[in-house]
Structure formats: structure tokens, C-alpha cells
Image (tube, rainbow, N blue to C red):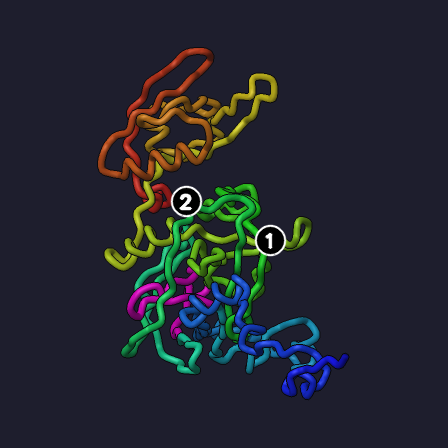
Amino acid sequence: MGISYPANVISQPLGKPKINEVNLYSNKSFITKAVERTGAAVVTIDTQKYVNKRKFPRNSQLFLDPYFERFFGLDTPYDNQPRIEQGQGSGFIFADGLVMTNAHVVNGSDKVVVGLTNGQKLDAKLIGQDLFTDLAVLKIKGKGPWPKAKLGNSAKIKVGDWAIAVGNPFGLENTVTLGIISNLNRNVTKLGIYDKKLELIQTDAAINPGNSGGPLLNSDGEVIGINTLIRSGPGAGLSFAIPINKAKEIAYQLIKNGKVIHPMIGISIIEESNSESKVNLVKVGYIVPNSPAEKSGIKIDDILIKVGNKDIETASDVIDQINKNGIYKQIDILIKRRNKFIKLKVNPTDITNLQNN
């Protein structure tokens, strides 16, 4: 008894089944999708600063042999000539022709050039910068349309979320590193930075030199922070970003007023944890002379119980309440001093007024 097969079956050569080549490459990772969503809005920022360098006074009688000048590290006549210092960083377009970046990227620059991913290089104007939060806004000189990054909500991120750092280190476009959110609300004073007013997102996504000012993205490609610094030496591998909610607030003040108001009362704050009672104490560590805090009667070692309508649990609570209050009205502060509760009224002032004291 014979068995018959359809001719088209037995004529097919044996081999590997065909794979749909389109499907093989269609499953993009969330990282690829995130970068594709925002990458075009990431820019390179080239800066130039004109420097006149002169260590010797004009009437100096010190003229040495050039060999000895070089040996002792002294200026040669060439060193005293005007020169151009060049710098580079990253940024991203967040509105029509407006770029957000770090203040330290553009501070003191005489010329700023923005490089787009399509190869265009355009001059840019500094709209405003705020050194206390390390943020700056630039305006590109040119006509759009411009690719724009989608801004996320940094209040919604949690420790353990994905973090994607994008920037253009050394002019290398869209360099991407991946990590997670390691911590939130990291106080920069714990990093030894005392001239900034920042609480940062901590991530292990590498922020390379030249990445400063570039966006930190979530898994959906939304900007949740601005890459700002790395920790070198002991504890290396830690990167930090400014939360985008804070950055938006600062950016809109810069666009509207060209500057930012920072309400302060003139104290430094210390957090002390009691392991037995599990209570976190927020104390006054230092008082700026002639500041609103000193004028109101606040003293070192006072424990801050309540600021405005907020019960104080962390240093961040104090900063938030003073920021919300502003500089145009008094704020009630309840302190504890030697087991005695004292209620004071304080008039916050702008931080620049404290510096001028």
C-alpha cells in the first residue's frame, strides 16, 4: 500500500524555518524608545570666555630669561596676552527656542553656541541664571520649529525607578547611560557643597564630563531631572540631578524676571535622630548676623517645632515652608528652648540681602 504526498510538500528543501526579519528587530527596549522620544531635544553647549591675564604690574622691572620664567612657573609675555577659554556642556530644549542647562556651564561666558542633533550650530543668548540652584535658561537665536523634550513630574519618582542620563560629553551626541534612582531629596550640604540651595536626585547612572545640563529621563522618556554633578574620590560612582519640578519653577522665574527670589531667614539647620524615641529633631546650627532670624530672637540650638502651619520633621520641611511664604509677609515659627515653647514671628528676606550684610 503506497502513501502519497502533495508535490509541493516533498519538493521543499529541508532547512531552518523562515523568521520574519521585520519582527526580529521590532522589539525595541524601553531605553531606546525613551531616547528616541527626547534625544532630538538634547543639545551641545559650547562656551567662550575672553580672558586678560596679567600677573605682573605694568611697571614691573622683573625680566627673566624665558627658560627661568618657565622653570619657576612665571608668566611669559605670550601668557600675558588675551586668550579665549573654551568650555562645553549639555542642555535640552523645553519650549520654543528655550534651553535649560546648568548655570556653571555658561557662567561668565562671553559667547554661547548651541549645537543641535541635526548638525546646526546657532548662537544663543543667556536669559537668566541662578547660581544658588545651578540653573540657567538660554534663548536660541534662530527660527524653529524646535524639537522639545517632554517634562515629567519629579514628585512621582520613587527609589528604584529606572534613570536614563543623556548628554553630549566631549561633543559626542546622545551619549546614554542607564541606572536607577538611588535616593531622593539629597541635601547638597552633606556633599560638602555650601554655596548652593539644592536638594538633588541621586542616581547610579553615570554622568560623564560634559553631561552637565543634560536631561535625566524616566522609562517613558520624560525629563525628571537635570544632570548636575558627580561625586569623585571616595564614594565615586554617585551622580546627582536637579529635580525637574524645581527646575521648572526656577526656569519660569528666570524667563519672567531674569532672576530668582530665594526667601531665607538666615539659619543653618542640623538634623539629629534619636534612635530610642525614633524622633528626628531639627535644630538651629548657625545664625547669620543681622539676619531676620537673629532679629526675631532665634538662638543656636533652638529646636524647630513648627514653621507656618507645618509640623517640622526634616530640614526640608523648614525650607519648603519659608519658600512658600515668600519675602513679603511674616511667618510664624514655634521653637523649643530648654523645655519651653516660644512662638516667634519672622520676616524672610532674599538670600542676596543676607550676603550683603
> Can residue 59 be seen here?
no
Whether 104 is drawn above or below 353: the answer is: below
The one nearer the camera, 166 or 99, is 166
Label for residue 101? none
Whether 130 is drawn above or below 12: the answer is: above
What's the residue type where badge 2 is placed? Ala
Report the quarter where the N terminus lies. bottom right
The one nearer the camera, 55 or 245, is 245
Q: Secondary structure at mark 1?
A: loop
Q: Which residues are magenta?
A: 90-112
Residue at 35% across, 38% down: 264
Quarter of the image for residue 148 reads bottom left
Residue 23 percent across, percent down from the top left: 55, 73
Residue at 28% across, 53% down: 253
Residue at 56% across, 21% down: 278
Real-space Cα distance between discs 1 and 2?
19 Å
Q: Residues within 10 Å of mark 1 (few under 14, many from 20)?
A: many
Marks 1 and 2 close (CB-CB < 8 Å)? no
Check if residue 72 falls in the magenta segment: no
Residue that sits furthest to the right in the current view: 1
Label for residue 155? 2
Whether 323 is drawn above or below 211: the answer is: above
The one nearer the camera, 228 or 53, is 228
Residue with the mark numbered 1: 204
Residue 4 percent across, percent down from the top left: 70, 82
